[in-house]
Amino acid sequence: MRWSQAFIPTLRESPADVESPSHRLLVRAGFIRRLGSGLYAYLPPGQRSLLKIAGIIRAELGAAGAQEFFLPLPHRHSVGRDTGGPARSGDGLSSVEDRSGPASAADIPHEAAFTELFRREIRSYRELPQVWYQIHAGLCDELRLKPGPRRLRQSLRMDSCSFDRDPSGLDRSYRLHYDLLCRTFTRCGLKVDTVEASSAGTDCSQSVDFVVRMGGGEDCVISCSCGYAANLECATSRISEVADEPACGAPRRVPTPGQKTISEVAAFLGAPATHQIKSLVYIAGDKPYLFLLRGDHQLNEAKIRAFAGNMAGRQARPDEIRELFGADAGSLGPVGISGMPIVADYALRGRQNMTCGANQDDFHLQGVTPDVHFRPVWADLRAAEPGEDCSRCGRPLGMYRATRIGYLRKLATASRESGAATVLDAEGKQVPVAVGNYGIDLERILSSVVELCHDDDGIIWPGTIAPFAVVLTPVNYRESVKAAADKLYEEMQGAQLEVLLDDRQERPGVKFKDADLVGIPYRVVLGAEKVSRGQAELFERASRKTELVDLASVIPALQSRLLGSVPV
Ligand SMILES: [Zn+2]
């Protein structure tokens, strides 16, 4: 490629409204442009890098025996309508309106499509295992839409499904994907952590996220030096026991005029937050739920999904709360409440003589004992926090921010009764298939690499996913230098090196700045004086080291370096 003909719109200035170094550099280096809220176009250099990432993924999956599909755009309702298959909807999905009516474009449409194909085509256990995948731009309804390419309305993803005859087969497919995802990320130049990502009650029996640590990451990981690491959404911790005064008799109603918050009630009644019950009302699928926590604990909203058909709930509005409880949010409690599920956090189990709202404004109840004065369902609802004790080893937990670039999920067979994939076993009996889901986010790989590999001058691509391997920079594209550059350019192309010839009539400083910004791993500089001696400068972007190389040795020198940069 000649730079004079390439579309690489680099910018001298930082764009406004950037969220992170990677966002700023990808815009400045001409890799992406914003077309609308959450919508980014990948320009030719960006697309070249995405294709490199896709190539690595295809190579790894192909070596593992996976087979690639090209599936139609998701119209979940049409798949569900034809087959009676499972049609989930809720958050995380984009609504799509077409001429046949509203539909949900699922963020995991491949699962429904693969399952449908499987149900129609695969009959016998002898045809298993199968691993099917596609690389595609999927829609997602991103709730926390921020500027920048890591939170998008659509994302380029690899989604794969494994179908096995039994759980031990699924174990093998899961392990296979674990290994190939690790290799993929390493080859892309990323160091990843694996963290637990499933919580009780969801439809996954085992689940892992692959994350990259970074300051601006959108996920939080709770971790411990013993190796425990979990997404904040499902992290747990150990809490110290609280001693209670023994309770006696029925709860006492006490006036608490104007006292609404946990800390106000604590000060007014002398009841510490650890001895109060916090009552939170959520609406999910039009139904109310009452969630109870210890006064000093925070609700983890991700954990309540298990009780609401895997849908995210929302906090009830003040008018809904008044209608349901006859009181405002500051005076709620579980005593006397019926007609809605009451779910209490494990930290309240075995406690007694506690304080909660009386479901009457300006009154609270004291002497309340769970399982005596109200009967909850017990569950893990509490958000673990850094500094609390690790539930495995007791040491204090830490927290770091990260971005998720891949995942593995083992689907629980029990949750897949309707529309599940089945095969005939050796006895001719219909048996459910063990299914796994796996994914990689290609765009997040790209932005994570930039986030972690850059300096003041620009991006530093690993050779494996750089848009070009080499930029050939004649200081002045004229006369003897032009002749030498054209000759070397042709030879590099003949040697299958991905070379960008900077044939622009620009000052050398401009050319060097652009090459540094775009982040091409190697730069070969041709100047009149050195060319006359049969030499070129070979500059390595990552180390910023320059060495003199004979013109005849430039290509072998590059080949050995690029080969050496490929992690195995
Ligand atoms: Zn630990």
Image (spheres, helix red, strand yellow):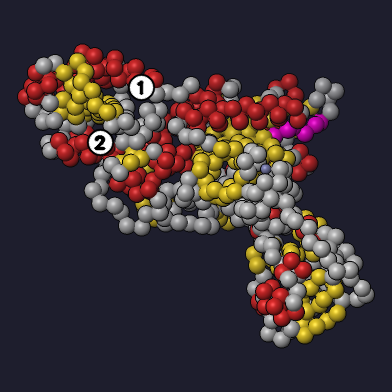
Name the residue nearer the viewer: 187 or 263: 263
Q: What main secondary structure does the magenta stretch of the protein show? A: strand
Q: Residue at x 72, y 35 (%)?
A: 421
**Residue tagged by mark 1?**
562
**Residue tagged by mark 2?**
515
Magenta stretch holds residue 431: yes
Tag 1's secondary structure?
Answer: helix
Asked whether the residues under the numbered discs 1 and 2 touch, taking CB atoms below 8 Å apart as contact, a structural biologist would say no
Determine which quarter of the picture holds residue 258.
bottom right
Q: What stretch is highlighted in magenta?
A: 430-435
Q: In this view, does 94 lie to the left or right of 55?
A: right
49 over 105 or under it: above or below: above
Q: Residue at x 49, y 30 (%)?
A: 186
Q: Position of residue 514 (x, y in %)?
A: 23, 39
Determine which quarter of the picture holds residue 374.
bottom right
Q: In this rendering, does residue 321 appear at all?
A: no
Q: Where is residue 389 in the image (x, y as percent from the top left)?
A: 69, 50
Q: Where is residue 147 in the image (x, y as percent from the top left)?
A: 42, 55
What is the total number of numbered labels drawn onto the structure image?
A: 2
Identify residue type, mark 1. Leu
Q: In this view, does 200 lie to the left or right of 493?
A: right
